Image (cartoon, grey):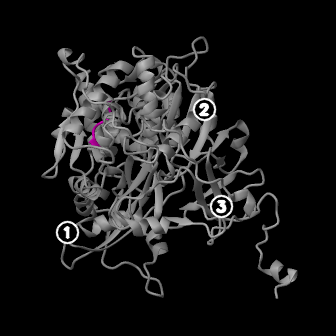
Amino acid sequence: MNSVADSAWLAPAWANDPELGPGRLRLAPEAEFPADHTLHSRFVEQAARTPDAVAVVARDRRLSYADVDAESARVASLLAGHGTTRGTLVGVVMHKGWEQVVGCLGVLRAGGAYVPIDPHWPAKRLAAVIAAAGLDTVLTQPTARDGVDWPSGLTVLDIEAPAPSERTVARTAADVPVTSRDVAYVIYTSGSTGVPKGVVIEHGPAVNTVLDVNDELSLTADDRVLGLSALNFDLSVYDIFGPLSVGGAVVLPGPEDAREPGNWLSLMAEESITVWNSVPALMAMVCEHLTSSPDAYPPSADAPSSLRAVLMSGDWIPVALPVEIRRFFPRAVQWSLGGATEASIWSIWHRIVPEDSTLPSIPYGTSMRNQKVFVADTLLRPRPTWVVGEICIAGVGLARAYLGDAEKTAKSFTVSPDTGERVYRTGDWGRLLPNGEIEFLGRDDMQVKIGGYRIELGDVEAALLRCPEVVCAVVTAPGDRSGKRLVAHVVLEAGAGRTGADIKKAAEEFLPPYMLPALVTVWDALPLTANGKVDRAALARHEEELDTEDENALPATEAEQALLSLWKGFFEASSLSVLDNFFELGGDSLRAVRLMAAVRKEMGVSLPVSALFSAPTVRSLALRIQESRAAA
């Protein structure tokens, strides 16, 4: 017979706490979404109400709601003619542009779900995702078609601006009816085995997030959202469907603007951008550009910036960044958002206030509408205040599954034994604060966040092992929370004679640029601990020995000497060479903005930030400077 005393020994410490007890964590039964909870339905209704309003602004076109309505309808008809119906997955392989919006809407109106794929991905990775998703049809644009190595047997359809004679031609079929429980999109993220995993998101959960943010921001038809994020990054879902749900507009920079904060600022001023949504690093680039080029942004005290909301997510927010944002955009309310692709963009948020600058980190925040983010132990029981645990997500935002992978789905999506609710285990660690917010503490596994991208180190290691003559590979991510980079350590077959640079070049066949190691070190044998495991601490202490050629590569021109002097202010390396790669030394996009600002100030030459990405050594950048001076 169990006594009260016996029960007390078995009950968790928080069981009788009114704030932490199980009752507080219980959710209502899973919400039944209204019929209009589909990503495209509100756009279609809005197009009927305000056909002449601006919907999409790109570098080469401005499209009204009527334009987007007609062109996406034609795409839907085209797809239907190629077999797309309710539940069909259709790839969207495009550069940044208006075609992405028309294409995604066309897929949804045909009843399908879109699968965004970066056209810059290596051919093998692109083919692997197309195969894993079982795609028969993809949408692309003429500017991307020729640059992609398409798998055989694939139907590739171009989206182009209609000829004048086609603009009045209506589609013949109605939109295919779908429900909130149909699939809206599948986004592929890095997978630990080297195979990307497709996150299946239904309409209802995605709309729940979009409408929650729209309501919190009081988004209206007067708003303009700057769509910086890549289509295969789920922040783009809000960029498109947030404004198009209320009659606003999405403004898209061109592919050439990808690394140019000066261009973003010009576009913000030209189009009166009101909402910024990106990873923190991109906003940090803007603030750095404004600091180094105070005359770069037209608004003044007499004509202040139109920006009224800044949304940042996907990575750590440096505590000092909100202070800088407030300095340049004083009227903008700032939000930190978090979550996972597996939980429909975002699940938790925190409105950033000036007092946050005194904290060790920006709070992760509190749960969003119809969602529950909590800190749990291994049995999914909520942890008391201040006690570290795994951050878990429950509620209506959860993905349906990983496409075609029941094992991964079962591992990450589980059922709480206490509440019976479905829970996603993020693998992130945090703790509950006394004010009810959660503090994010990072991860302790093989997954890292770099530049907002979630990267499985195992995915990078698997790609390296596919390179010729590589027999062992270990990847680490040294650096602090705001400046991590990937470093690879490999062992080659006996007598291989290949360098780390050779292996990195070979890995380009399998990995997109953001997953390529900044540095690859070749070892005769990896250091091991006493129990035979790879000694990661020893790897972290190791510094690659530079080639003699690199060590002796001294400046040969005045421009090289001046550049080398500038570089010494950016890195703590004991010696630098004119052949050192800026990004392999630990440089990132933010440092790139600072360096190019220093080049402009100290050397009198103004080059775009992208110049450093294409010429990342002192020697190659000096040549670009000389060419610029000669052309002036």
Tag 3 residue: 375
Give the image quarter of residue 322: top right
Identify the magenta region: 92-97
Q: CA distance from mark 1 to mark 3?
A: 44 Å
User: Disc 1 vs disc 3: which is toward the camera?
Assistant: 3
The residue that label 2 is drawn on is 215
Q: Amino acid at mark 3?
A: Val
Question: Can you say which quadrant of the picture contains the N terminus?
Answer: bottom right
| Whole-percent x, y for residue 90 in the image | 28, 45
The dominant secondary structure in magenta is loop
Nearer to me, 184 or 521: 184
- Label 1 and label 2: CA atoms lie apart by 53 Å
Q: Residue 419 colored magenta?
A: no
Residue located 18% across and 15% down the image: 165
As drawn, is 397 to the left or to the right of 151?
right
Side of 67 where 77 appears, left or right: left
